Amino acid sequence: GQQLNQSPQSMFIQEGEDVSMNCTSSSIFNTWLWYKQDPGEGPVLLIALYKAGELTSNGRLTAQFGITRKDSFLNISASIPSDVGIYFCAGQLGDNDMRFGAGTRLTVKP
Amino acid sequence: DTGVSQDPRHKITKRGQNVTFRCDPISEHNRLYWYRQTLGQGPEFLTYFQNEAQLEKSRLLSDRFSAERPKGSFSTLEIQRTEQGDSAMYLCASSLVTSGEYSEQFFGPGTRLTVL
């Protein structure tokens, strides 16, 4: 089963608002990843984090690797309609086994 | 399109039937992964290949499941005697691993299986 606790489960926001979601785990990970999945498609990588405490940005997205290596957050600034989708966090300890959270479903109202 | 492809995209079958899915990874990628995703959940790791060798299998992969990657390129996932609990999206991903460091996994669009 899932080892990662991702919250919130869903969010309904107005276009232009900022969004924040996070992920916690009872286990440590060496890599934290954030994916976005659109309906009928596979997940697409948004941001990868490799070091505890690392803060990384990708356009309007910002993510941080928690100092304890057991948590991460993702922020989206100035949301737009195409941000709609399901966002998954994932933790990786070795180089093959990736564990996913249950996802945050984001709805953006124009 | 040079991404990961999966076939079929959708499969509806009756309980007890066998099904086989195919995954074509990105050319030259040496690692190929299979995941299962049920509604409202994230993908769960099933198994992975390094070239043609199957190196790890999850406890989720029961004896009814078998995966192959005979020539180190495409892979097949077969489910025998399907059960309603097998209904899920089956995702394939590939990556190019050249050292012990993390390498991005690129996902295919998935095969949605419905077992009636």
Image (cartoon, coloured by chain):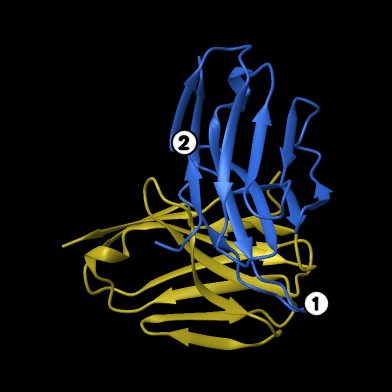
Chain colours: A yellow, B blue
Q: Residue at x 61, y 60 (%)?
A: B94
Q: Is residue B77 above or below residue B29?
A: above
Residue B57 in percent (x, y) is at 81, 45
Label 1 amino acid?
Gly
Judging depth in this view, the residue of B73 and B40 nearest the camera is B73
**First reached walking from the N terminus: tag 2 or tag 1:** 2
Q: Which mark is residue B100?
A: 1
Q: Are marks 2 and 1 on the same chain?
A: yes
Residue drawn at point x = 38 percent, y = 54 percent: A38
Can residue B44 be seen in the rendering of this structure?
Answer: yes
Provide residue B90's location: percent of width, then percent of height. 56, 40
- Residues B51 and A42: in front is B51
Secondary element at tag 1: loop
Say which amino acid is labelled 2.
Answer: Pro
Q: Position of residue A70 (x, y in %)?
A: 72, 70
Up/down of A9 relative to B63, above or below: below
Q: Which residue is mark 2?
A: B8
> Element under label 2?
loop
